């Protein structure tokens, strides 16, 4: 399947196969007026299969969100058909309102207006814990 | 120090400093009677407590300060749905320091972000209770004269007991400590406590289900209550609650210099005939709790 190259925009590459839609939603790409392509299950030498997102507009993407979903994702910035920049993705130290604490005993369960903040407590296992009750973030 | 939310907010040096200050208060109470004159402590207790609240309040009164507050969410605007943040913003306009207990985990942390005055966590659900741990540490130091080189037995509910986990965390930072964990299989210490504090710091420990065989080797025996509210199932509670009861007769195999501790309240896990044994330290522990809270209030208000 062919999707045209883009002149100015972003290519979010090396997304774990199946996670493209999650990323599309987390970055609110559905709200954009420009063309957006979500390509699923592209063959990849390194990964077997991967997802790719192409956005026909140079956006300020939330690298925190990308890093949390998968720090192996790459972001290429395209201007005049050339790659002019690559963003380095890292595991964010802290994520705010990206995931919800599910512990029923946590203060966030009764006080709705509180931001749900998770801190990276173990980069090796990519463990995030709620700053309030210290519960581990559950795999979604 | 701005707030005390978790015992790990304190370094070993800060704990030693608090313990030394508490000992000085015990020896020279008159020197501290006016230290907090015109200062106000707000005790915000969103759930009931006997010891912790009265201990904080008497600590502040013994320092010459005042106490305001409430005991029970029904006696505050929380009953009208006011948030923790708004409650402490209000209290921050009246008081100089807050001691807060709340049934929800993390509520004191939320309070510390909005109060504008120091916040002490006086217990947040089953999560943290740092002033109980400070009380336990002062008791150990007063009874043993040291923090190093001893065998500490912890008995009862080691799975849900937050005071047990905090004490293990705190004592793991000293040299020559050995632990013996005595509990039924169902209430064993969770693996993350074993991994995070004992394995990681190379601390020797053993696990057993038999109190009698463990008793002779102990310098300290820390008993805990098997709490009804931690069980989902009444049958399990009834079956396990009597598993580990300390009696005067059992104590006959223990060392003469053993120290028996308990965070209280007890139900029946220490029979009352142990109370007048010299080794029983749990009511002394209550008394020490006031002195360590006096030291803590002084430190957090920046008063020498």
Image (tube, coloured by chain):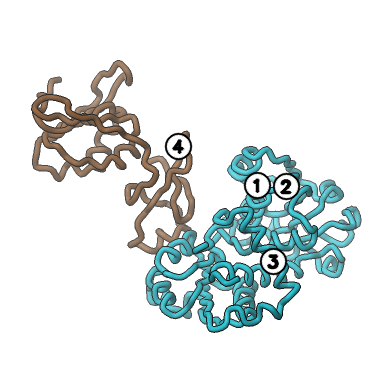
Chain colours: A brown, B cyan
Closer to the camera: disc 2 or disc 4? 4
Q: Mark 3 lies on which chain?
A: B
The Cα–Cα distance between marks 1 and 4, rounded to whole angstroms, is: 25 Å
The Cα–Cα distance between marks 3 and 2, rounded to whole angstroms, is: 19 Å
Closer to the camera: disc 1 or disc 4? 4
Residue tagged 4: A123
Q: Residues within 10 Å of mark 4 (few under 14, many from 20)?
A: few
Q: How crowded is mark 2: few (under 14 residues within 10 Å), some or many (20 or more)?
A: many
Residue tagged 2: B181
Residue at (80% x, 58% y) in the render:
B144
Q: Are the residues under marks 1 and 4 on the same chain? A: no
Residue B150, above or below B268: above
Q: Name the element at disc 3.
A: loop
Residue at (65% x, 40% y) in the render:
B201
Residue B189 — which label?
1
- Pointer 4 and pointer 3: residues touching (CB < 8 Å)? no
């Amino acid at each position: 399947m062919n999707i045209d190259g883009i002149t100015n925009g972003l290519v979010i590459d090396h997304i774990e196969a199946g996670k493209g839609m999650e990323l599309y939603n987390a970055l609110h790409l559905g709200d954009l007026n420009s063309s957006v392509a979500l390509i699923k299950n592209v063959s990849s030498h390194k990964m077997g299969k991967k997802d790719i997102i192409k956005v026909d507009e140079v956006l300020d993407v939330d690298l925190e969100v990308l890093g949390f979903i998968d720090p192996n994702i790459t972001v290429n910035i395209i201007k005049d058909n050339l790659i002019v920049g690559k963003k380095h993705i890292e595991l964010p130290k802290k994520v705010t309102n990206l995931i919800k604490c599910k512990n029923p005993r946590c203060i966030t369960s009764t006080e709705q207006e509180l931001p749900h903040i998770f801190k990276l407590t173990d980069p090796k296992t990519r463990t995030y814990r709620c700053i309030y009750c210290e519960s581990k973030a559950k795999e979604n | 120090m701005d707030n005390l939310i978790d015992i790990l907010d304190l370094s070993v040096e800060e704990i030693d400093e608090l313990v030394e200050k508490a000992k000085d208060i015990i020896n020279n109470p008159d020197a501290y009677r006016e230290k907090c004159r015109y200062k106000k402590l707000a005790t915000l207790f969103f759930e009931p407590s006997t010891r912790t609240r009265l201990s904080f309040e008497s600590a502040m009164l013994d320092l010459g300060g005042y106490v305001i507050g409430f005991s029970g969410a029904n006696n505050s605007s929380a009953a009208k749905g006011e948030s923790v943040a708004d409650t402490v913003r209000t209290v921050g306009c009246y008081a100089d320091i807050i001691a807060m207990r709340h049934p929800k985990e993390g509520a004191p942390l939320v309070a510390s972000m909005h109060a504008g005055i120091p916040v002490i966590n006086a217990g947040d659900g089953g999560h943290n209770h740092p002033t109980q741990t400070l009380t336990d540490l002062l008791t150990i130091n007063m009874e043993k004269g040291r923090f190093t080189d001893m065998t500490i037995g912890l008995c009862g509910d080691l799975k849900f007991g937050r005071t047990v986990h905090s004490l293990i965390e705190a004592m793991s930072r000293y040299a020559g400590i050995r632990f013996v964990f005595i509990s039924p299989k169902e209430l064993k210490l969770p693996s993350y406590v074993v991994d995070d504090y004992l394995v990681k710091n190379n601390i020797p420990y053993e696990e057993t289900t038999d109190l009698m065989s463990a008793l002779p080797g102990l310098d300290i025996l820390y008993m805990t209550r098997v709490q009804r509210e931690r069980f989902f199932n009444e049958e399990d509670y009834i079956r396990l609650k009597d598993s580990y009861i300390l009696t005067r007769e059992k104590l006959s195999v223990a060392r003469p210099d053993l120290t028996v501790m308990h965070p209280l309240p007890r139900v029946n896990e220490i029979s009352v005939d142990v109370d007048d044994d010299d080794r029983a330290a749990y009511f002394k522990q209550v008394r020490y709790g006031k002195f360590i809270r006096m030291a803590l209030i002084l430190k957090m208000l920046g008063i020498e």
